[in-house]
Amino acid sequence: MLSPSSVAFLKRLLDAPAPSGFETAAARVWRAEASTFADNVSADVAGNSMAEVNPGGSPTIMLDGHIDEIGVIVQYIDDDGYLYISPIGGWDPQVLVAQRIRFLGTDGDVLGVVGKKPIHLMKSEDRERASKITDLWVDIGATSRAEAEARVSVGDPGVVDSRSLDFPNDRIVSRSIDDRIGAFTVLEALRRYAEKPGKARVVAAATTQEEIAWHGGGAAICAQALGPKVAIVVDVTFATDHPNIEKKEIGEHKMGGGPILSRGALISPVVLKLLRETAKQSGIAHVVHAVGRDTSTNADAIHIAREGVATALVSIPNRYMHSPNEMVSLADVDNAATLIAEFCRTLTDEMDLTAR
């Protein structure tokens, strides 16, 4: 099980506001924790954070979890001091209605509330219409453009103002599970590997800009610099154990059922086989997820870095993705960290990772 200190670190990490392109607050929390046990901790110009164990070892294994979250950005301020926002990443505008927003202003955080016309004043046809983000505004209590601009600026990012919550049955809720939980898991796996290192050099990376990363984001830069032979990407995927989910389309992934290992297109069959063998030997329950094309994760960029990287994807089942209340099981996180640490101990330079 996760230690109390690890859970406390996880909550600090989840609560730090860090939308894509503005990951500094969460990255500092991650690096501070990594510094308590890693041999080397560093950052790069893309905002990626790296923690290394067994720096003289070989081969190099990259453990990737993106540290950014979806958010919003100030697009326009009107004469009455209301803010209009654009999305950072993929939002369903319905979940933004009536939320509180925490903007990361130059001189400190600024709170606002998302406004919408009251239902009493809507025409009947408008009541049935889904809100668009352009229908919404944010009220920070200002009475003029000048007053608003004294506190926030166009281009200031923001996140939903919420804190992580403990739920029964070893579950945790947060707006930033996707994918702060991955950044946490790779560091927890590195911590466990550090207790009993194998032959490999292992680098955990908290990478940036995945939520807007049609270009590969920070992960592409990080993989190019580290030159790993193997990469394990940790992200979330859709839990299918709640109402209105079609398992025939995306498979069966239950919270508490263990980590999910992707199989298909971009995934190294050799690394996947080693992961499954490690899971079996360690008694770790897991589920296989079929991926026919790209994975929509950092694995898509990492596997084509340099001359190619043998890449696998380990996912944590997540309920209510891209909402203010994402939910995962800490048991799944714990098992994923153990699986990855044990996998890293098995890898040697003599292993042939060529797909044949």
Image (cartoon, helix red, strand yellow):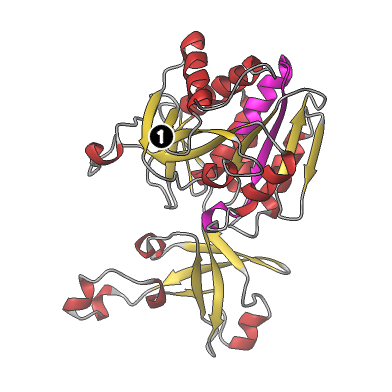
Q: Quadrant of residue 259?
A: top left
Q: Position of residue 332 (x, y in %)?
A: 47, 26
**Element under disc 1:** strand
Residue name at image x 54 percent, y 36 percent: 234
> Would residue 69 be visible to someone looking at this image?
no
Q: Is residue 281 above or below residue 17?
A: above
Relative to 227, 261 lies left or right: left
- For image coordinates 56% across by 85% down, the residue present is 143
**Disc 1 marks which residue?**
264
Instruction: Determine the residue positioned at 71% across, 15% down.
Output: 198
Give how far across and how far down residue 187 sits, in percent: 65, 32
Q: Residue 133: x percent and y percent? A: 40, 71
Q: Is residue 69 above or below residue 116?
A: above
Q: Position of residue 85 (x, y in %)?
A: 50, 73
Q: Does 177 sit left or right of 318 as displayed?
A: right
Residue 207 located within the stretch drawn in magenta: yes
Please indicate whether residue 171 sits to the left or right of residue 307 in the image.
Answer: left
Q: Quadrant of residue 286?
A: top left
Residue at coordinates 69% horizontally, 45% vertically from top-left? 224
Q: Is residue 52 magenta?
A: no
Q: In the rendered structure, which segment of residues is drawn in magenta?
A: 186-212
Specify few, some or many for label 1: CA neighbours under 10 Å numbering under 14, 14-19, or 20 or more. some
The N terminus, quarter of image: top right
Could you tell me if residue 143 is visible in this image? Answer: yes
Q: Nearer the viewer, residue 267 or 3?
A: 267
Toward the viewer: 2 or 61? 61
Q: Amino acid at mark 1?
A: Gly
